[in-house]
Amino acid sequence: FFLFLSHFRSRCFLSYSNGTERNMLGRLPLLSSSLSSRALPRSSRPLSRFLSSQSEEPGNPISPETGKHELWRDGIYDHDNEPKVMRRDGSFEPIEKLRGFINYQRNPEPYRDPLERVTDWEELNPTSEDVDLKHNEVERKVQAARCMDCGTPFCSTHSGCPVNNKIPEWNNLVYEGQLREAIDRLHSTNNFPEFTGRVCPAPCEGACVAGLVDSPVTIKNIEYSIVDKAWDEGYITPRVPKVRTGMTVAVVGSGPAGLAAADELNQMGHSVTVFEREDRIGGLLMYGIPNMKLSKDTVDRRVDLLRSEGIEFVTNADIGKNIDVHELRSNFDALALCVGATMPRDLPVPGRDLKGVHFAMEFLTKNQKRLLMTRDGNIESAWSKDEFINAAGKDVIVIGGGDTGTDCIGTSMRHRCRSVTNFELMPVPPEQRAPDNPWPQWPRVYGVDYGHAEVTAVFGKDPRVYSVMTKEFLGDDEGNLRALVTQDVEIKDGAPVPVPGSEKEWKADLVVLSMGFIAPEDYIASQLGLEVDQRNNIHAIYGDYRTSVEGVFAAGDCRRGQSLVVWAINEGRGVAQKANEFLEKKRDAELGAKDDFV
């Protein structure tokens, strides 16, 4: 690491517009004060900070009218040519990449306005029709130019990107305007960039080297701009394998891990069938992530492509219940379990059984099914009340943070709830990295997600309440939830401890439990006799993916525990490699047996 710092420092003494030298490592205390004081030579410690805030910059190159870098054209007849772009020093020059991370400012593509988007279920990201928000080709090139050609791209390592996306490479291709090559490079490591570009929290940006001294590159924006443009231009087409191996694979579960495994195995020439217990393909992508974060048309588009490439999909197939798992295993050469971690963490306090207390995934899934029923032409009067949890006009409390908690907040807002509050057990995160959270780890810092912004825009305050735990749910005479009681907590020796006398009652008509997931449902593992680990996940070593039963593999959340979509894709690709090795040996053994018989 110290060698890296030395290399990085030698490349960062660059002259700025006034001719003075600025050391870009001047902001290294962001790593941790103790590390930076040990790692840097004494002579470098007092050097000036580099562009630490907008107020210290010579000029803000972002136009307040367009939300993009200011442009300038020399003449009235050159509108077909690339304009000059305003730099941080106020000058207008052609776009260049050598000093892009110095000359240009981070400018992520904004979400649609909160007051507009809470009135619909469309995606948060602007479409091509939102010309005031959507980045154009010039701004995308400017943002790609900020990728600094660092010696060691931590964004592509496991600390930054679990699928090891070749981020500097496709950033450079975007800068060069080579879209077809960019989507090929993106697909070489990531089967579904249109999913990760929308729902991934972007640990790559937390590990970006530019983020050490300034703001990170807008990697997530660039990723989904590549894939969306590639779809629009017709660059993503079916790749039907020319040769089939004759081997068959059953993939159980059609979430990101299952789809990635199926895609890889199909391209290897195996015949793949994906079994999904729900009525639609996509798993978490279809029913666990709400429409405003990931349009279901986007999911269906990719599934249709996989189907056209030869993958067979079977819905309403609950393996271990309405389809015998042993029969499935006997009919296929290999079995890959990608069933996710679907058992939610409960809150066993008095009043838990009151009507109005629901798990997050139950709330989100029923809402998404209602939306799909509407899209498919089912009239509202045909909906069953048991199939929909309505937050309209209710005081909603979401217990637990994270992405799922935010999704529950956003869903409640679109239901027109009366109020929404979000309880978090831990204290407020710091504004900057703590000493025990150095770069390139994911920054555990305070942030405002889309749901929090929507609540603030509508109700005038952030919905989050920190350092609080729920003691009891209170109901009325008919068994309906009417309130809950909380108690403040403080952290002692790394654990939350209740504060005596801090009890408080909160009015609530609907409580959504969003406290994560603990394990996969066990009926498949128990019927197959699979070993499980101490957390009741299916036991299979990472990188190997073999379970305790020959020919049965496991990947994704059912193996590693609750995690990110990008980690599920990583494991889906990994299990496909190991299953392929098993299938090749099995095929060779069968061919050898036939030769011996002859």
Image: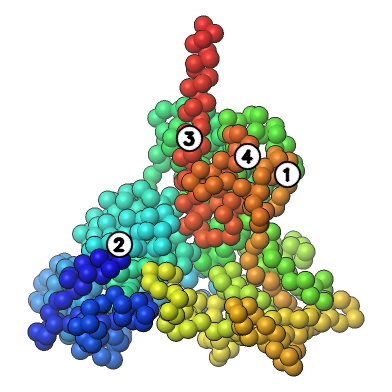
**Quadrant assignment, res 210:** bottom left
Instruction: Judge depth for marks 1 and 3 and give the one in front.
Output: 1
Q: CA distance from mark 4 to mark 3?
A: 18 Å
Q: Answer with left or right where residue 134 lies relative to residue 89.
A: right
Crowding at mark 4 (Cα within 10 Å: few <14, some 14-19, many 20+) = some
Q: Secondary structure at mark 2?
A: loop
Q: Which residue is mark 2?
A: 153
Instruction: Judge depth for marks 1 and 4 and give the one in front.
Output: 4
| Disc assigned to residue 548 | 4
Which residue is at a point 55% across and 51% down the rendered structure image? 556
Counting residues from the start of the chain, the first of labels 2 and 1 encountered is 2
Closest to the observer, 566 or 299: 566
Which residue is at a point 63% across and 36% down the rendered structure image? 549
Reply above or below: 280 against 392. Answer: above
Q: Amino acid at mark 4?
A: Ser
Q: Which residue is mark 1?
A: 526
| Farthest residue, direction right | 477
**Quadrant assignment, res 53:** bottom left
Counting residues from the start of the chain, the first of labels 2 and 3 encountered is 2
Counting residues from the start of the chain, the first of labels 1 and 3 encountered is 1
Counting residues from the start of the chain, the first of labels 4 and 2 encountered is 2
Q: Secondary structure at mark 1?
A: helix
Q: CA distance from mark 2 to mark 3?
A: 30 Å
| Farthest residue, direction bottom | 501
Q: Amino acid at mark 1?
A: Ser
